[in-house]
Image (cartoon, rainbow, N blue to C red):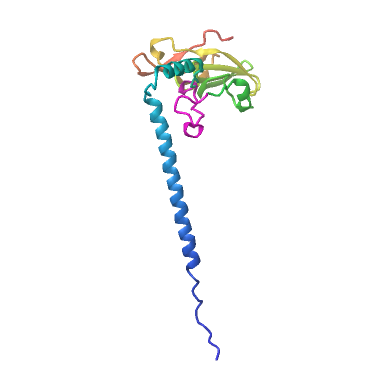
Amino acid sequence: MRNDSPYTPLLNGSANNHRRDLLLVLSGLLLLASIIAFSGYRGGFINSREPHADVSSSSSSSASSDEAAKPSAVSRGVSSGVSEKSNTFLSGKVVGEAESFPWDNTMLSWQRTAFHFQPEKNWMNDPNGPLYYKGWYHFFYQYNPNGAVWGDIVWGHAVSRDIIHWLHLPLAMVADQWYDSNGVWTGSATILPDGQVIMLYTGSTNESVQVQNLAYPADLND
């Protein structure tokens, strides 16, 4: 007699159990490797901050001469708007001994924008007071002339005939008055019906109070 089963036979669970055990083993190995890596990094950091005892006077003088002859790597740091590009644990060096890379503008020129506006160097943010005046597009922007991070904000100035090729001009407004000594901040520019160009902007005073200021171009032909 035929025995037609009314249900689907259950699968053997041994294969699933094997995969689960393998996954647990791999997870444990990964966790162990992470702990070892973190411990090694912490050890290198601590060793870099603790002075080492001298083994002998001769070895101490030899090490001192070697350190004096060895050029120290200069970190670019936050003042240049970049972070460190080395891993002290993987490089086998303690913190502060990683060699710096000789970046320069030539090797980084390919990263500059092709059509979007960009200053020749340093930090920029808000565009301010774009206007078209006597055949020229004038573009003002928040700019730090002293570094690649935000700070010391003044108004940069550039002009263009086609909004693609830009001529960089001297700074339009600088922090030289009590009412903007801590920053010539965001504002706008407009042309009045009589042809006069005016600029409104927020200034940060010598007491770090924000005030609204009105400025006129010193030379309309500039």
Residue 112 position, x and y percent, is 61, 26
Q: Is residue 90 magenta?
A: yes
Who's the residue at 55% across and 91% down the image? 1
Who's the residue at 46% across and 60% down the image? 20
Q: Would you identify the image quadrant in which residue 151 lies?
A: top left
Q: Nearer the viewer, residue 37 or 134?
A: 37
Q: Nearer the viewer, residue 39 or 152?
A: 39
Residue at the extreme left of the image, as rendered: 207
Provide the major secondary structure of the magenta segment: loop
Q: Which residues are magenta?
A: 76-99
Who's the residue at 47% across and 56% down the image? 23
**For the image shown, how many numbered marks are present on the structure?**
0
User: Taking 88 as reference, is 167 left or right?
Assistant: right
Residue 191 position, x and y percent, is 53, 17
Residue at the extreme bottom of the image, as rendered: 1
Residue 6 position, x and y percent, is 50, 82
Depicted 78 relative to depicted 171: above or below? below
Who's the residue at 43% across and 41% down the image? 36
Mark yes or no: residue 192 visible.
no
Depicted 29 relative to depicted 215: above or below? below
Depicted 181 relative to depicted 52: above or below? above
Residue 13 position, x and y percent, is 47, 68
Q: Is residue 114 magenta?
A: no
Depicted 67 relative to depicted 38: above or below? above
Name the quarter where the C terminus is drawn: top right
